[in-house]
Image (spheres, rainbow, N blue to C red):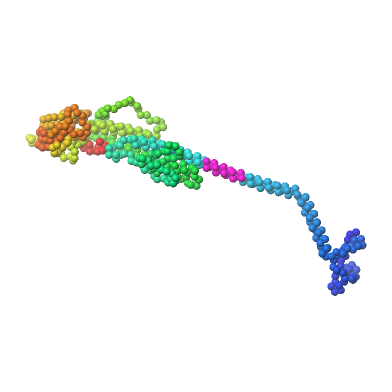
């Protein structure tokens, strides 16, 4: 039978227990709970009662939790496995992304290194070109004897290089003479310009600004090449101006350069025509034009060496009588003076004014002791009133060679040199040739 609880009510005033159903007083007992079953009653104290109730609640909760766990056990495990799987996939994706970034960075570094190596190779090829051009420039002779038109050394710009880089100075102080090491490592050494910087930068990180340094090296080579071109232009202009000046002088003297054969210098050899290849650049074509102009200048120079353009007496020109009509110093009558008289002292040297061959060396009437030199192309010079003759007929003489000494022999009133220039036997004013020589200046 079910247990029945009988309520007991304590009254403070009487101290007895009153039955709620009968409202009858009973003797006072201690507080608690009474359980009835089959006519039997069990009395529980408050502490025991609540312990029993708590135990039942705990057992019920434990049963409920256990049932819930077993009911949802598979779902929890599945969710935990799915979460772990998601976390693992996320980590793998992150690792793959990082690997991709590393591969991308590595590829970029390799690509940058390849680009730098290509740039270095281009600079080395350009260096070789500059070396060959410099050799060509240094092989050109001086357009003027004074060296005023000589290709000046080109000093390259200073470029910052790493401290460990060693620079080797060029023996010619010319930065376009780039001394490359025998092993042909990625270096280009010169005074102030070196591709070793670029080679050094291939091992550095991109943050070191190697692109800027390579650009600066490229600019330095550009400036050197521009200076080479400027020097080449100056040499070409110098030769062309020299040729034009000599042609004008010959034309003013009434001599046709095209009809004047150049004196023979005992030269020869097989004819080998000059042919420019199709891949010849502007530098090669300009160098070809310079060589042609130089050949013309050399030929005209040899021709002018046989034209009496120099002074026969050293020092300042002091003329005592000019060319043309004058009063004869002995007869005081108008007479033609076929030369010019240089005032000088006895014994002063008289020099040949051009290359040639002595045709006369001796006494010749009013000339007294006289030397005549034939220079070819119908040109001849005469040196009169000498005190002594130092050459013989048939002897070859060079410009500036002493042919005699100043005197006063023959029809003369005092020591001086009578100097004549003749074209095809006809006397012409020597001052015309002397002025032409002054115009040519250092071109002679």
Secondary structure mostly seen in magenta is helix
Residue 51 picture location, percent across and down: 81, 62
Residue 49 picture location, percent across and down: 83, 63
Question: Can residue 249 be seen in this snapshot?
Answer: yes
Number of numbered tags placed on the structure image: 0
Residue 369 picture location, percent across and down: 13, 32
**Foreground of the two, 234 or 385:** 385
Q: Is residue 390 left or right of residue 232?
A: left
**Residue occupying image coordinates x 33% and y 41%:** 152
Q: Is residue 108 magenta?
A: yes
Residue 79 picture location, percent across and down: 71, 48
Quarter location, residue 400: top left
**Foreground of the two, 173 or 319:** 173
**Foreground of the two, 414 or 251:** 414
Q: Specify start and end residues of the magenta stretch as a single range.
A: 95-110
**Foreground of the two, 65 or 303:** 65
Outermost top residue: 270
Q: Is residue 304 left or right of residue 408?
A: right
Answer above or below: position of 184 versus 55: above
Answer above or below: position of 85 versus 303: below
Answer above or below: position of 2 versus 264: below
Outermost right residue: 39
Outermost bottom residue: 13
Q: Is residue 194 magenta?
A: no
């Amino acid at each position: 039978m079910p247990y029945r609880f009988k309520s007991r009510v304590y009254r403070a005033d009487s101290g007895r227990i009153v039955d709620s159903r009968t409202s009858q007083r009973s003797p006072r007992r201690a507080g608690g709970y009474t359980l009835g079953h089959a006519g039997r009653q069990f009395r529980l104290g408050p502490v025991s009662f609540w312990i029993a109730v708590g135990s039942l609640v705990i057992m019920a909760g434990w049963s409920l939790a256990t049932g819930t766990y077993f009911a949802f056990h598979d779902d929890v495990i599945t969710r935990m496995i799915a979460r772990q799987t998601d976390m693992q996939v996320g980590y793998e994706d992150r690792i793959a992304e990082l690997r991709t970034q590393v591969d991308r960075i590595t590829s970029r570094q390799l690509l940058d290194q390849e680009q730098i190596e290509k740039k270095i190779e281009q600079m080395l090829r350009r260096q070789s070109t500059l070396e060959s051009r410099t050799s060509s420039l240094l092989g050109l002779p001086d357009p003027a004897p004074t060296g005023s038109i000589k290709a000046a050394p080109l000093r390259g710009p200073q470029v910052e290089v790493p401290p460990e880089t060693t620079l080797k100075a060029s023996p010619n102080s010319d930065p376009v003479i780039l001394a490359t090491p025998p092993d042909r490592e990625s270096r280009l050494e010169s005074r102030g310009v070196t591709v070793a910087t670029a080679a050094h930068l291939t091992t550095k990180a991109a943050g070191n600004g190697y692109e800027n340094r390579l650009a600066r090296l490229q600019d330095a080579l550009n400036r050197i090449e521009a200076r080479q071109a400027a020097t080449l232009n100056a040499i070409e202009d110098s030769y062309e101006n020299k040729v034009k000046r000599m042609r004008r002088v010959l034309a003013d003297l009434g001599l046709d350069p095209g009809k004047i054969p150049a004196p023979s210098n005992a030269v020869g050899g097989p004819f080998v025509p000059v042919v420019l290849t199709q891949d010849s650049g502007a530098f090669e074509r300009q160098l070809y034009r310079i060589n042609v102009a130089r050949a013309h200048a050399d030929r005209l120079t040899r021709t002018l060496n046989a034209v009496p353009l120099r002074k026969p007496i050293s020092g300042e020109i002091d003329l005592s009588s000019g060319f043309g009509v004058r009063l004869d110093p002995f007869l005081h009558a108008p007479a033609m003076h076929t030369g010019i008289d240089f005032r000088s002292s006895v014994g002063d040297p008289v020099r040949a004014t051009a290359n040639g061959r002595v045709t006369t060396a001796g006494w010749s009437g009013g000339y007294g002791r006289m030397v005549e030199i034939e220079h070819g192309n119908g040109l001849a010079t005469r040196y009169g009133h000498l005190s002594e003759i130092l050459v013989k007929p048939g002897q070859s003489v060079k410009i500036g060679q002493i042919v005699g000494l100043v005197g006063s022999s023959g029809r003369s009133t005092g020591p001086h040199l009578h100097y004549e220039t003749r074209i095809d036997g006809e006397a012409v004013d020597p001052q015309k040739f002397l002025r032409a020589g002054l115009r040519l200046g250092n071109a002679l």
